[in-house]
């Protein structure tokens, strides 16, 4: 088993003005930042992975701000094709 724990984060920034008939304040660019923690375990036999992420968003402008939690699981499997 290979354990891993560490900090994680992201920034989402709008780079162009809004346009169209529903754009109320086109010059305001959306943005949000987040920090969090990621923890996971990877097994080599069988090949599988389990990860947990938690983000807390902050400094949101012109969009929602909140908490994100995710659990991811992956399992490698093989299909054997037999031809006669």
Image (spheres, grey):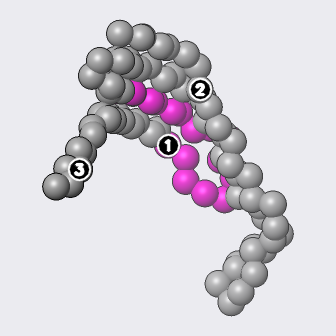
Q: Earlier in the sequence, mark 3 or mark 1?
A: 1
> What's the residue at 49%, 43% (across, down)?
66
Any mark on residue 81, and which? 3
Q: CA distance from mark 1 to mark 2?
A: 16 Å
Foreground of the two, 24 or 16: 16
Does the residue at mark 3 contact the one at mark 1 (Cβ under 8 Å)?
no
Does the residue at mark 1 contact the one at mark 2 (Cβ under 8 Å)?
no
Badge 2 is on which residue?
8
* Badge nearest the viewer, 3 or 1: 3
Q: Secondary structure at mark 1?
A: loop
First to last magenta residue range? 50-66
> What's the residue at 44%, 19% (across, down)?
39
Horizontal arrangement in the rendering, residue 46 relative to residue 32 (left or right):
left
Q: Earlier in the sequence, mark 3 or mark 2?
A: 2
Any mark on residue 66, and which? 1
Foreground of the two, 50 or 76: 76
């Amino acid at each position: 088993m290979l354990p891993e724990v560490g900090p994680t984060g992201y920034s989402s920034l709008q780079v162009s003005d809004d346009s169209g008939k529903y754009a109320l304040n086109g010059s305001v660019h959306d943005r949000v930042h987040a920090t969090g923690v990621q923890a996971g375990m990877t097994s080599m036999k069988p090949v599988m992975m389990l990860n947990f992420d938690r983000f807390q968003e902050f400094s949101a402008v012109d969009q929602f701000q909140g908490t994100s939690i995710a659990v991811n699981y992956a399992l490698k499997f093989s299909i054997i094709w037999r031809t006669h």
